[in-house]
Amino acid sequence: MLVYYYRNAERLSAELLDSLVASMPQQQQDIVLHYKTHRQRCEQAIAYTMLCHALQNDLALINASPTTIKAFPLSAFRLPLSALPIWAFGEHGKPYITNYEGIHFNISHCREAVAVGISDHEIGIDIEGRRRFSDTLIERAFSDEEKAIMKDCDDPQKEFACIWTRKEAWFKYTGTGILMDHLKTTEADARDADCIIHTSPVVSTNEGDEVFWLSIAEKRRQI
């Protein structure tokens, strides 16, 4: 599996964004331009660009284990591919590729970063930076064990991001969207489905020591 991430997508110039969009199939252009803000369009365009780059240059990493996590070198990317991927969406909005058999992917973005995971099996990913939270959300969404972790940690905002990415990655793996009645039981639900959730800190290389949390949900591999 391969995960690419890109920092500060909204800093993409309008000229470069237009160039990326113009290189896409019409269906993909429509998806990007459906979004209203510059930041949202940049996130979608860069996500598609990262997917194209992986399919063109990193097929061996997509099929490999363990997961490779890399900052995406946008300046190194070149179109076109011989066969540009076409996106479609499942019932609850999970994207998939219609014209690359056996390739699965998932997208995540937060205010500071966008990430794409590409694999030869079903996945769900989520990326988050340090973020604020309310006690009401903790009470509603966290299990007793997760609440205890939050109470004892040194950096609650960072720990919240770590735990929350695991929940979102699981729901994105299932393709159901967030189910409020199951927020407290995501870890148990994942185990019951023989799914494993990996969580890793991603240290930004161009913004000092800022840390993001990246979680990946996938079917447990049979050994």
Image (cartoon, rainbow, N blue to C red):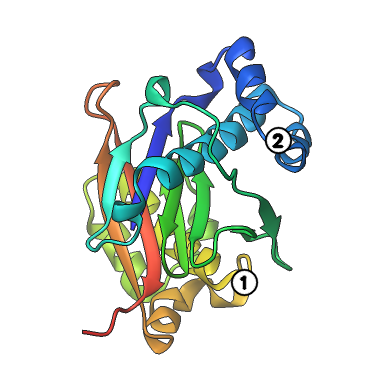
Q: Is residue 23 above or below residue 155?
A: above
Label at residue 105:
none
Mark 2 or mark 1: which comes first in sequence? 2
**What residue lies at 49% left-to-right and 62% top-to-bottom?**
103
Residue 15 percent across, percent down from the top left: 62, 10
The residue tagged 2 is 32
70 horizontally vs 176: left or right: left
Q: Amino acid at mark 2?
A: Val
Q: Quadrant of residue 91?
A: bottom right
Q: Quadrant of the C terminus?
A: bottom left
Indicate the quadrant where residue 38 lies: top right
Kindly identify the amino acid type of the residue bearing the numbered disc 1. Answer: Leu
The residue positioned farthest toward the front in the image shown = 82
The image position of residue 120, as x and y in percent, is 41, 66
- Residue 140 seen in this snapshot: no
Location of residue 218 in the rendering, given as x and y in whole percent from the top left corner: 39, 70
Report the residue marked by disc 1.
179
Q: Residues within 10 Å of mark 1 (few under 14, many from 20)?
A: few
Q: Secondary structure at mark 1?
A: loop
Query: Mark 2 packing: few (<14 Cα in 10 Å), some, or many (20+)?
Result: many
Residue 110, compared with residue 86, is above or below; it is above
Q: Residue at x 53, y 29 (%)?
A: 79
Camera sees residue 17? yes
Q: Nearer the viewer, residue 51 or 113?
A: 51
| Residue at point 64%, 32% (across, down) | 40
Instruction: Report the quarter where the N terminus lies.
Output: bottom left
* 53 to the left or right of 171: left
